[in-house]
Amino acid sequence: RGFGIISGYDGNVFKPNDPVKQAEALAMMVRAFGLEDEAEELAKRFGSIYLSIDQDIKKQDNKRLKNHWYYWKYENDDAPGWFYSNGSWYPYVPASARWSLGYILIAVDEGWVELDDLHPEKPATRAWVAKALVRASGNGKLAEAKMNAKLDFKDAKAIPDGYWGYVAQAVDMGLFKGYVDNTF
């Protein structure tokens, strides 16, 4: 509360044992980087476009809607696809995560996350957060060079492909230490 990075839910509820969703993790990152005003401005600026597509959208790949084009990479998935409106492409944010619109727009625009790897309502794994934080800190190239680095965690083999170097870089940066039992 003191830094304003983590906020609770409506009704003054914190839910301390719930997993952090990806949208929530991005909101914390945006706040930590001091970009919350920009996120709020983006949400105001683009919110009406998202409301209009909500009236149109059906999850089918590459379908022409009444006023929009959209593309869903995975059918029946909550991952935002892209939609085209007013001469531009935008990442689609599901209505259930719309509160995080500005945060997601910043994270996608800044390259912290890729749409293929963004599922706003799913839990943010430690590997996912490591990748987003490393990219947000401008160390993505260093992480890419460490994809074959040795990680001393007992469960290192459980780190998904494409995340290994980001976890290694996050550890090198002191963002993650792992647990006392030497697991990530």
Image (spheres, rainbow, N blue to C red):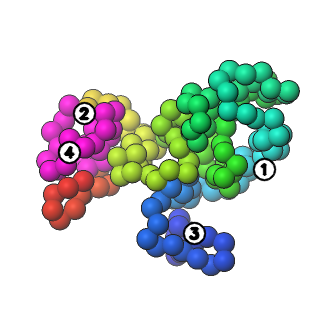
Local SS, label 2: loop
Q: Earlier in the sequence, mark 4 or mark 2?
A: 2
Whole-angstrom CA distance, mark 2 to mark 3, is: 34 Å
In the picture, measured across the screen, residue 43 lies left or right of residue 171, that is right
Q: Nearer the viewer, residue 121 or 47?
A: 121
Mark 4 belongs to which amino acid?
Answer: Ala
Residue highlighted by disc 3 = 7
Mark positioned earlier in the residue sequence (2 or 1): 1
Residue 83 picture location, percent across and down: 71, 29
Q: Which residue does the numbered mark 4 point to in the structure image?
A: 156
Tell me which residue sits at (31%, 33%) in the image. Answer: 161
Q: From the top left corner, tell me how far across and down residue 107 is, in percent.
A: 56, 43
Mark in the foreground, 4 or 2? 4
Q: Which residue corresponds to mark 1?
A: 44
Q: Residues within 10 Å of mark 3 (few under 14, many from 20)?
A: some
Q: Nearer the viewer, mark 1 or mark 4?
A: 4
89 displayed left or right of 126: right
Q: Earlier in the sequence, mark 4 or mark 3?
A: 3
Instruction: Describe the element under mark 4 as helix, strand or loop.
Output: helix
Magenta span of residues? 148-172
Residue lying at 68% horizontally and 32% vertically, measured from the top left: 59
